[in-house]
Amino acid sequence: MKRRIVVMMGGPSGEHDVSLASGRQVALALDALGHDVSALVIGRDGTWSRLPVTALPALEPSVQGPGTGRVDSVRAAAGVAELAGVDAVFLAFHGTFGEDGAIQGLLHTLGIPYTGSGPLASALAMHKAKAKELYQFHGLQVPRSVMVSWRAWQADPTAAAAMVLQQVGVPLVIKPNRGGSSIGARPVAAAADVAPALANALAQDEAALAEERLRGTELTCAVLEEPDGELATLPVVEIQSRHDGFFDFEEKYKGADAVEIVPARISDAVAAQCQAVAKTAHRALLCEGFSRTDLFWTDRGPVVLETNTIPGLTPQSLLPRAAKAAGISFPTLMDRLVELAILRAAREARS
């Protein structure tokens, strides 16, 4: 069925360019299926612009500075008017504002169907420390970790770094608590490097997460919801990073050095455990539509890092590669997510 779809992308976050790259791929795929598709691009300055698919430029994602996570209220009010009469909104945002539940809450209030998880699940998944608490409550293993607030860092940087070393130790990874695409994340091998890594992460977010550096096989597994609410999983993807086992921004979006193997070179039994973990993580956070959970297979079994409620949808992204391995084309996958959004909205309207 032909739908009137708006793909929303951009936004005031450090992942603005990644979102534009994802959004363009989504818009082109849905347009090729015959839908009436346009793009609603939110600029880093807060401007909302409605554009035809043909006006979306191809670009290579680059690291941006930390975004504000907010938009100008006058511009936003004018931009929202562009959503009148649409059948569904495809959310191709990444990072704060677009992936953390803010825009989901707005669309929910307006009664406009949108792809992916709702406000609560989006906020929980974005908050890495809280997500870990929920994973553990549901029986999943997570790395040792501690969160450092900007306030604690400002009060006593030396004490904050000492707390990280005492509770986690080196080697570790320090990253913004809310964020993605490895922006602001650094592996730390020496005690002297903890403070600079904390400062770097806290320049991106109000809290930093310091977590144990895992060793083992890095994996990721996507979950897709069926129309009846049942969950299906895509083939597990194995990630081999050339940067001392740390999958950074350059490798994720520019194809630099990393090797991504689909399906992963693991036994069927291990794959089944990883897929079960991805489903449990999806349910623990109350995700909807789709998600992708990152984990390591270690000598103590699967250890969960985080769940992405809007995984990357660029040509280099892991979800499209896993879907292709399962025989699901990119346009078919995008169309399926739109239909799930419309079904959910109809279900919520009845209740």
Image (cartoon, helix red, strand yellow):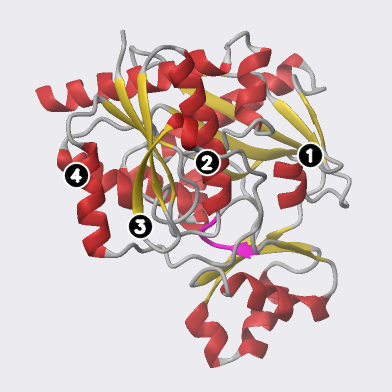
The numbered mark, 4 or 1, whose residue comes first in the sequence reads 4
Residue drawn at point x = 72 percent, y = 79 percent: 196
Q: Is residue 175 above or below residue 227?
A: below
Asked if residue 269 shows in the view, the reply is yes
How many angstroms separate mark 3 from mark 1 (CA)? 31 Å
**To which residue does mark 1 refer?**
255
- In reply to whether residue 178 is colored magenta, the answer given is yes
Asked if residue 225 shows in the view, the reply is no
The dot on residue 134 is none
**To which residue does mark 3 refer?**
47
Q: Are marks 3 and 2 in contact (CB under 8 Å)?
A: no
**To which residue does mark 2 refer?**
308
Q: Position of residue 106 (x, y in %)?
A: 23, 47
Q: Is residue 199 above or below residue 185?
A: below
How busy is the neighbourhood of tag 3: few (under 14 within 10 Å), some, or many (20 plus)? some
**Kind of residue at badge 1:** Gly
How many angstroms separate mark 4 from mark 3 (CA)? 13 Å
How many angstroms separate mark 2 from mark 1 (CA)? 20 Å
Rendered image quadrant of residue 194: bottom right
Counting the numbered discs, the total is: 4
Q: Which residues are magenta?
A: 175-179
**To which residue does mark 4 refer?**
81
Q: Are marks 4 and 3 in contact (CB under 8 Å)?
A: no
Hey, which residue is sitting farthest left in the picture? 350
How busy is the neighbourhood of tag 1: few (under 14 within 10 Å), some, or many (20 plus)? some
Element carrying mark 4: helix
How many angstroms separate mark 2 from mark 4 (CA)? 29 Å
Please tell me whether the stretch drawn in magenta is mainly helix, strand or loop.
loop
The numbered mark, 3 or 1, whose residue comes first in the sequence reads 3
